[in-house]
Amino acid sequence: DTAVSQTPKYLVTQMGNDKSIKCEQNLGHDTMYWYKQDSKKFLKIMFSYNNKELIINETVPNRFSPKSPDKAHLNLHINSLELGDSAVYFCASSQTGGGPQHFGDGTRLSIL
Amino acid sequence: ELKVEQNPLFLSMQEGKNYTIYCNYSTTSDRLYWYRQDPGKSLESLFVLLSNGAVKQEGRLMASLDTKARLSTLHITAAVHDLSATYFCAARPDTNAGKSTFGDGTTLTVKP
């Protein structure tokens, strides 16, 4: 009964490849997020969707494309992976109204 | 744009001692969050502070909020090893309810 689940947990791939990360939440929340956490643990928001609508789109390379098929799912597709994309990517969800965010376990992306 | 500064970024303390982590934010915010992250793990919500003067306590951790000073504190009382983790504060701006900005995190190490 995991609240926010991400797959895969680990992703090791080569430069130039395209990969996707999937996220699902069963909390009934209407807002979902993608964060990138670098090796120094700095956490930066990338995207946020509210009821399938993109509401936050930070300055990230357009190689990153989020997609929310419904309010319980938010996926992240990355084209032409680069070395600098190596990081931990966290999905999170929250309810409109300002409750805390609930985070998934993270996807550890390593680019060879 | 809302900026959030935490200090210290690294904190090493002995068991049994008290200490405070500070979180300053740059513009008006309608709520302040504290999260905990264990090494290699996800982020877990600790506290949500909604109003000036709010104080919340859980075990050896107590968080407070001063909206006039734009300052939140996380006080640790009689630290134990199990509190070793990275603590993040995050502020949600009045003007963009969908977006919380995270501080850089304070990595706490409690030594026997």
Image (cartoon, grey):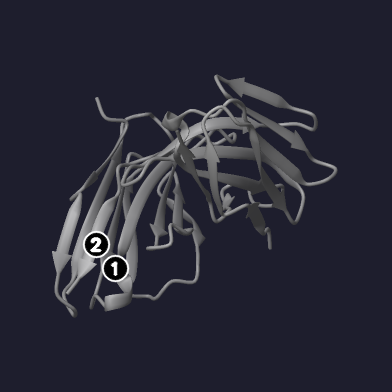
Q: Is residue B58 left or right of residue A53?
A: right
Quarter where residue A77 is shown: bottom left
Disc on res. A10 = none
Q: At label 1, which amino acid type do we have?
A: Ser
* Residue at numbered disc 2: A109
The number of numbered discs placed on residues in the rendered structure image is 2
Q: Chain of mark 1?
A: A
For the residues labelled 2 and 1, the Cα–Cα distance comes to 5 Å
Q: Residue at x 32, y 57 (%)?
A: A88
**From what the image shows, is residue A49 above or below residue B76?**
below
Residue B102, x across and y down, in percent? 56, 52
Q: Residue at x 31, y 71 (%)?
A: A85
Crowdedness near tag 1: few (<14), some (14–19) or many (≥20) residues, C-alpha within 10 Å = many
Q: Is residue A30 visible?
A: no
Residue B101, x across and y down, in percent? 58, 53
Q: Is residue B9 left or right of residue B82?
A: right
* Residue at numbered disc 1: A86
In front here: A72 or A38? A38
Residue B39, x across and y down, in percent? 35, 45
Pointer 2 with pointer 1, Cβ within 8 A: yes
Q: Is residue A104 visible?
A: yes
Crowdedness near tag 2: few (<14), some (14–19) or many (≥20) residues, C-alpha within 10 Å = many
Q: Residue at x 72, y 46 (%)?
A: B29
Q: Residue at x 18, y 54 (%)?
A: A10
Quarter where residue B72 is shown: top right
SS for callout 2: strand
Residues beneath discs 2 and 1 located on the same chain: yes
In front here: A16 or A32? A16
SS for callout 1: loop
Task: Name the N-terminal-most of marks 2 and 1.
Answer: 1
Q: Chain of mark 2?
A: A
**From what the image shows, is residue A38 above or below residue A2?**
below
